[in-house]
Image (tube, grey):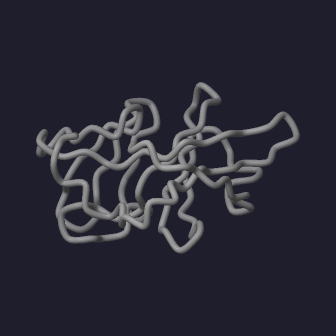
Amino acid sequence: MSGAPVRWFDVPEAEGLWEGDLVEAEVAGERVLVVHHVDGSFAAYQGMCPHQEFPLAYGKWDEEENTLTCAGHGWEFDLTSGAGINPSGCRLHRYPIRATDAGAVRIGIPQDGEARHDSSREA
C-alpha cells in the first residue's frame, strides 16, 4: 500500500459475518470483498478480479484452503495474502481492516485517488 493517508469506514454488511464466509460491500465508492477466515481473522481485498473485472464475491471460496476461484474465468487467489495462484503473476489489493469485540468492522481506504480494481501485476 502507498503512504497515502487512510480514512476508515464502517462496513455494516460485514457485521455478523460468520467465520468461513465472505461478503461484498461498497466502501467509499470502491467494491471490496470482506473475508472472515475460519480462524476468526478478517481480510479485505479489491472486489473485482484483475483479469476482466468480474465480481469476486460470485467466486468459489474454499475456506479451509483460503483460496478463491473467480467465477468469470477461473483465476485463483490466496485469500490469506491476496497473491495470485493461477496465474501467479497477479495480486489482489489488500485493504487494512479492523474488527471490534462489539462486532463492528471497519475498512481503511487510502485517500490517494487511485483505483484498486486492476492489480494484475505483482507489487
Which residue shows up at 48% across the image and 68% down it? Answer: 31
Q: Nearer the viewer, residue 29 or 55?
A: 29
Task: Give the percent coordinates (x, y) of residue 4.
Answer: 47, 49
Q: Nearer the viewer, residue 38 or 2?
A: 2
Task: Point out the image quarter for the N terminus.
Answer: top left
Which residue shows up at 50% across the image and 54% down it? Answer: 110
Task: Give the percent coordinates (x, y) of residue 25.
Answer: 58, 66
| Quadrant of residue 10 within the rendered picture | bottom right
Which residue shows up at 69% across the image and 58% down it? Answer: 9
Q: How many marks?
A: 0
Task: Point out the image quarter for the C terminus.
Answer: top left
Task: Give the percent coordinates (x, y) of residue 7.
Answer: 63, 55
| Quadrant of residue 122 within the rendered picture | top left
Q: Is residue 100 left or right of residue 23?
A: right
Task: Give the percent coordinates (x, y) of residue 32.
Answer: 49, 60
* Residue placed furthest toward the top: 39
Seen in the picture, residue 98 relative to 15 is either above or below; the reply is above
Which residue shows up at 39% across the image and 44% down it? Answer: 2
Q: Is residue 118 left or right of residue 96?
A: left
Q: Nearer the viewer, residue 59 or 25?
A: 25
Q: Is residue 24 left or right of residue 75?
A: right
* Residue placed furthest toward the right: 102
